[in-house]
Image (cartoon, coloured by chain):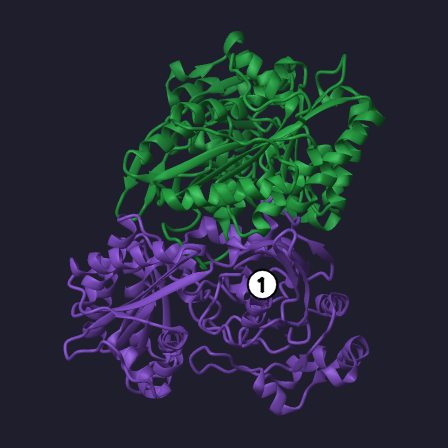
Chain colours: A green, B purple
Amino acid sequence: MTTATQTLPVLEQLETFRQIVGAQYVFVDEEVLYNYSHDETEHLSFLPDVVIKPRTPEEISAIMKICNRYGIPVTPRGGGTGLSGGALPHLGGVLLSMERLNTILEIDERNLQVTTEPGVITEVLQDAVKEKGLFYPPDPSSKGSCFIGGNIAENSGGPKAVKYGVVKDYVINLEVVLPTGEIIWTGANVLKNSTGYNLTQLMVGSEGTLGIVTKIVLKLIPLPKYDLLMLVPFQNLEKAGEAVSAIFRAGFTPSALELVEIDALKITAAMVGASVVAVTEDTAAHLIIEVDGNNVDVLMQEMEAIAELMVQYEGGEVYFADDAQQKAELWKLRRRAAEAVKLEGYTIEEDTVVPRAELPALIHGVKELGKQYHFHSVCYGHAGDGNLHIRIKKPGTQNSQEDPEIQTAIRALFELVRELGGTISGEHGIGLVQKGFMDIMFREAQFRLFREIKKAFDPNNILNAGKIFN
Amino acid sequence: MTTATQTLPVLEQLETFRQIVGAQYVFVDEEVLYNYSHDETEHLSFLPDVVIKPRTPEEISAIMKICNRYGIPVTPRGGGTGLSGGALPHLGGVLLSMERLNTILEIDERNLQVTTEPGVITEVLQDAVKEKGLFYPPDPSSKGSCFIGGNIAENSGGPKAVKYGVVKDYVINLEVVLPTGEIIWTGANVLKNSTGYNLTQLMVGSEGTLGIVTKIVLKLIPLPKYDLLMLVPFQNLEKAGEAVSAIFRAGFTPSALELVEIDALKITAAMVGASVVAVTEDTAAHLIIEVDGNNVDVLMQEMEAIAELMVQYEGGEVYFADDAQQKAELWKLRRRAAEAVKLEGYTIEEDTVVPRAELPALIHGVKELGKQYHFHSVCYGHAGDGNLHIRIKKPGTQNSQEDPEIQTAIRALFELVRELGGTISGEHGIGLVQKGFMDIMFREAQFRLFREIKKAFDPNNILNAGKIFN
């Protein structure tokens, strides 16, 4: 909780905020403040001074002008599913919830584009375009509750990224309210653009520190007609990692290629009440492999060829998901893994990413570090992209920030990641909890560029200040 | 030619430059200066004071430190195939040719990545990875002579972009010498990255104004085994445009979908000595349609389905390219169109891009503007992306900059493009010749961001200053 002295400037503006958005959308009661004090990041919580729920870019612009003038911290927030603390109001001030900007404005079937507001839930958007035979692939595990605006802030990925790319590959134009209150468009509604610096891609992944996205134009593609799914067990975790790389080298591009360590699968299965398929005593991990396309015979051939290839990497008996229900069950086991293992005490999540073929070395390194620094880990993630989520449990520790030994261990892990050619976040962002490790990836020259870019957008450093870097 | 007073600072440093790169790589004789005074942009020419050909990032860093200290203008140059004047040394000073940084450093078959220097010719790179069964898709028409570094500066596209994306979709990490002489890496060698602001994508398409790219890490994909190619004639140019959009709406994603107006085809055929196929008296334009993939039967079915669809849009008799030679001939006709029509006096090239379904409206608008402003035009380009190249001829005019009526006409054209949701450059960049039209796309808020970003990278405004914006 911030002190009275600190809250004075923001509380003096409450009446103005009420005039801008309507009194019913300005909240100062403790219950609401508490609800917006945390997201899915470990167990961190910071109370804002006020929660505001605007409806339009113009309202947001008016709020930003006030905050910019009086130096009031502003933290934008989407669905609250973030894993790096990007939406946490750690400096108090205004929490700006985007939940009322929740309209899909236009599905342009002629041009295969959708224009949407940022507060639309990702799955709602995907279902809406699917009805028109169109496909927006990026699908983070939290797709049922995260907002598309938050996906843009974090440059989210998800299982389909391995074939279809991440959020940045679909965003073609953004309407943004700058911290100064100016409203701009970053680009144009086109598939190719060499017209000035790429402000669109600078916004994507900037974690709400450069501006507040209020309209989003996304590229869509035709919806593939068929997909096939299989689960392959491995006795050896590193062999599973080797198999991943082999699939691409053989010329296949699966539409999903996920790795789930056995503990994650078991914990999740227990939580959702599913029977775990294809598990023998000595199973260490599974690969979940999906192919999609418009010709089911071709897909069958691909699946069989991939299954044969897996045998060379000591893959066990393959389980094919036969129908929509079996596929949905399998995906549920994967998608709910983070939630399940978190409930089991694995509260700290790392989002490492390495070149795909270095996955076995990363997995090996994680387990070695666990022995050295006394933590348990379970790994799962988007193996096809080299993106491994590592959930950490150390008895007595809930937050990575609290425990010096965990901080040392994470630093060692991230240094390994860098040595392998990788980086410390693939799709969750840096936010608050990874900020202290950015020096592993960048030197003063890059930090200077980051700071100067931030200053160009936000001269008074009011918007989500103190996230990503200092 | 610059005056003696202006050249003084740079000429005083010649001895230092010679010490840095070796005397044989510092040129001040007029013939060399002239050779580096122009590129493929209209008939513009500006002499540099000195041409330097460094070999290493460290040499470039040393040169930049000198130039930064003494305020000497530096213009980086790739293959000299640019169409917007980005590599023209319009302020004199140092012309920095990247031609000696021409080594492919590593083809990483395990991770499907290539690390290369910027002075490698695009086609050389493509052929080198092809030998390993890998594919780097972006292929500008100038691929036989342009440099991969120049492609990154302009965010180039080419015919394959419609299925595979443009340069930005393949660049994952860059080594960059900043104008201050600092050497940085922008990212990591990974497929997904949410670690700080996207400096990689800020560099791509920045036209050599933010830094000098010295190493490039590109994502590769498995090489498709087969491709099929056909040519479809249309009597009505706008109907051809409508057909383009219909192909995607029907769920097909061709690997190339090009439009060539009949005059461009005839002029090019005459130049290269090819017989023009599938041309009847009343042909107005052709679509060149390619599909690729790993199953030839599926591709045949796709081709037939697309051919049937074309009939609905008044497409004429389809010509299928039967073998590699026929395919190569057809592509030659498309690729050499720009060169051929330029020789015929169409010296001014515009690089408009609109949402795909707006192509007929754009084509109609171009022809109307031609009548109004007394210019002839031929259109060709990457119709699948909505990217239309418009070559303009007006008797007595070689440079768009020279003729006030052409300037007015281009402004009217670009305003139409903006109204259609498009932008003024899809893949050629803004450089020098489109700079005066940037106010059509952007307002002061965006220009302020551009200027501040430029200043963050280049505080003394020495690197390719006066390009893109003022």
Rendering quarter of residue A430:
top right
Give A397 or B282, whichever is nearer the viewer: B282
Q: Position of residue A340 (x, y in %)?
A: 59, 17
The answer to whether A125 is drawn above or below residue B48 in the figure is above
Give the position of the N terminus of chain A as an image quadrant.
Answer: top right
Q: Which residue is mark 1?
A: B209
Give A157 or A217, whichever is nearer the viewer: A157
Kind of element beneath mark 1: loop
Residue visible at 72% across and 74% down?
B54
The chain letter under disc 1 is B
**Label 1: few (<14), some or many (≥20) within 10 Å?**
many
Residue type at mark 1 is Thr
Give the position of the C terminus of chain A as an image quadrant.
Answer: top right
Could you tell me if residue A98 is visible in this image?
A: no
The answer to whether B392 is drawn above or below residue A256 in the figure is below
Q: Position of residue A3 (x, y in %)?
A: 65, 14
Q: Would you say B457 lies left or right of A216 here?
A: right
